[in-house]
Amino acid sequence: MKNITDSFLSLSYWPSAGSFGFDTDILATNLINLSVVLGVLIFFGKGVLSDLLDNRKQRILRTIRNSEELREGAIEQLEKARARLRKVETEADRFRVNGYSEIEREKLKLINSINTTLEQLENYKNETIQFEQQKAIHQVQQRVLQQALQGALGTLNSSLNNELHLRTISANIGMFGAMKDKKN
């Protein structure tokens, strides 16, 4: 091992003119090495890097195209949804107007029906009141007539004697007989 190390050290002492050797100036050798590595990388890596960049560019363009297509599809769907919404709103407005009209018609029918029913009930009430009045008047007339007859009979019974009684009966029989003759 010592021989290997000595041989590297002895190479550093060789003259640089026309021979190969190691430069111990680290800054100068690093710049050269770096420029060589960069040159090799650029020369050989240019195609690989260009291919990578082209592939990346193509993927980005495909993504953009897909995004545009999706955006256009979304816009179409949005327009269709807006058209459906307008149609549904129009239908809803029509149903609302028709519903309100139908409600108004039904309300008017109900009001008219109630008015008719109220008029009929008022007529029935008036007829019932008239009937009850007539009934009450008839009952009062019957009672007054009955009381008058009872009073007259009482007066007749108290003031009539047998002879007057017989004459009254005969007169009434004669009146009935005359009425019977007129009918025939």
Image (spheres, helix red, strand yellow):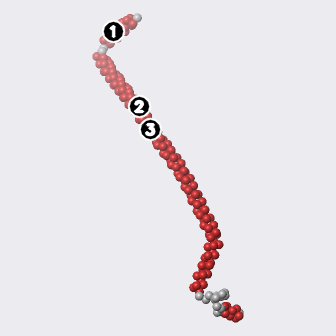
Look at 39% across and 30% down and name the residue there.
119
Does label 3 or label 1 sit earlier along the sequence? Answer: 3
Residue 47 on image: x %, y %: 64, 69
Q: Nearer the viewer, mark 3 or mark 1?
A: 3
Look at 33% across and 21% down and name the residue there.
145
Q: Is residue 100 left or right of residue 154?
A: right
Instruction: Tell me the SS state at disc 1.
Output: helix
Does label 2 or label 3 sit earlier along the sequence? Answer: 3
Disc tally is 3
Q: Nearer the viewer, mark 2 or mark 1?
A: 2
Badge 1: how crowded within 10 Å, few (<14), some, or many (20+)? few
Look at 40% across and 30% down and name the residue there.
120
**Which residue was labeled with disc 3?**
101
Q: What numbered label is drawn on residue 116?
A: 2
Q: Is residue 132 visible?
A: no
Badge 2: how crowded within 10 Å, few (<14), some, or many (20+)? few
Q: Give the position of the C terminus as an image quadrant.
A: top left
Does label 2 or label 1 sit earlier along the sequence? Answer: 2
Q: Nearer the viewer, residue 55 or 136?
A: 55
Instruction: Tell me the SS state at disc 3.
Output: helix
The quarter of the picture where residue 134 lies is top left
Q: Nearer the viewer, residue 144 or 74?
A: 74
Q: Nearer the viewer, residue 19 or 150?
A: 19
Q: Is residue 59 left or right of residue 183?
A: right
Question: In the displayed image of the protein, which residue is found farthest to the front?
Answer: 18
Residue 180 on image: x %, y %: 39, 7
| 182 shown above or below 38 | above
Q: What numbered label is drawn on residue 171?
A: 1
| 84 shown above or below 144 | below
